[in-house]
Image (cartoon, rainbow, N blue to C red):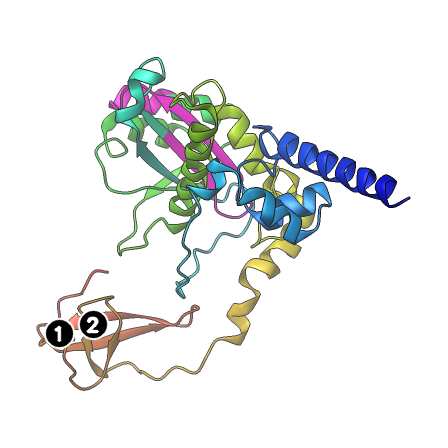
Amino acid sequence: MATHASEETEEQEKERERVLKATYYDFANPASFGGIKKLSKTTKVPYEKTKQFLSSQDPYYFHKGVRHKFLRRATLSYGINELWQCDLVDLKHLGKHNNGFRYLLTVIDVFSKYARVSALKMTTAEAVKNAFENLFQQAKPKNIQTDKGSEFYNSQVKSLFQRHSINHYSAEGDHKASVVERFNRTLKNKMFRVFTYRNSYKYVDILHLLVKSYNDTEHRSIGMAPSQVTQEVEPHIFKKLYGFLEKNSKVILNKGDLVRISKANKTFRRGYLPGWSDEVFRVTKVYFSHPTTFELQDLKSEAIKG
């Protein structure tokens, strides 16, 4: 009997590993090339067993990220396709492995977290305009936020946005497009795990599957997969994303207060400490966002960007 039980356990272990491998290495599966929790939930394999499996898989082990959490001001969006954040990812070093495609135009709907990606060979005005035109056949936003690069700020892209009545703008500060930047990290992490698995830098043939995998994966901030977000659940999603705005912490600075800016992370406070700016600034406006943010002027009444 003991021998029979041992054989059953061995069979169960083999089946468990088969299920884990089949799921993790399926490019289109929401749990593919991701983390422990996601794979465990999808396969129904206990967390510790899943962790043990992934620790032996090179694509996971060699590309496990380190997460740093900081409180940032929320990027507000009031519904699906109300605001897209867009970026260009430079993958020139992989062009020879991908039929000459050297860039990715990444687009994310800030509200639903739904992502769209176009592979580009060049980032000329015409190439970027054509990529946007193709995207607008699927969906069209009211607003688009990008960095200030000439790939986005040129007459061809401007004309396209105007024709579709899309408001285009850029923001200041170190985290001006944090939602799309976070998506870029997620996508590249998946890609490099795939590279390790396939022993190849080719991605152009499975890019659409990796994006589908992302869109079909439950997103922590909205509690569902981006592909599942509809207009019917917009009120629920808005509350999940921005409900904390109703519980903002006490504001300790007021209009007219004098402050110094941190050299390290651009936060600020009264008084003087090493690592803080010598120059003093005046608070001119308080925004009751989360976290609370402020407009500053120097003592010559010139606005400070950031």
Q: Nearer the viewer, residue 225 or 97?
A: 97
Horizontal and vertical percent position of residue 23: 64, 33
As helix, strand or loop, the secondary structure at mark 1 comes to loop
Q: Quadrant of the N terminus?
A: top right
**Over which residues does the magenta segment extend?**
105-130
Asked if the magenta segment contains residue 129, the reply would be yes
Q: CA distance from mark 1 to mark 2?
A: 6 Å
Q: Does the rendering let one see residue 140?
A: yes
Q: Is residue 217 above or below residue 66?
A: above
Q: Is residue 203 above or below residue 299?
A: above
Q: Which residue is painted at 28% across and 33% down in the image?
A: 152
Inspect the image, locate mark 1, and give the three-letter code of the amino acid beneath it: Ser
Q: Residue furthest top?
A: 99
Label 1–label 2 contact, CB within 8 A = yes
Horizontal and vertical percent position of residue 132: 40, 26
Q: Which residue is painted at 68% across and 32% down in the image?
A: 18
As helix, strand or loop, the secondary structure at mark 2 comes to loop
Mark linked to residue 277: 1
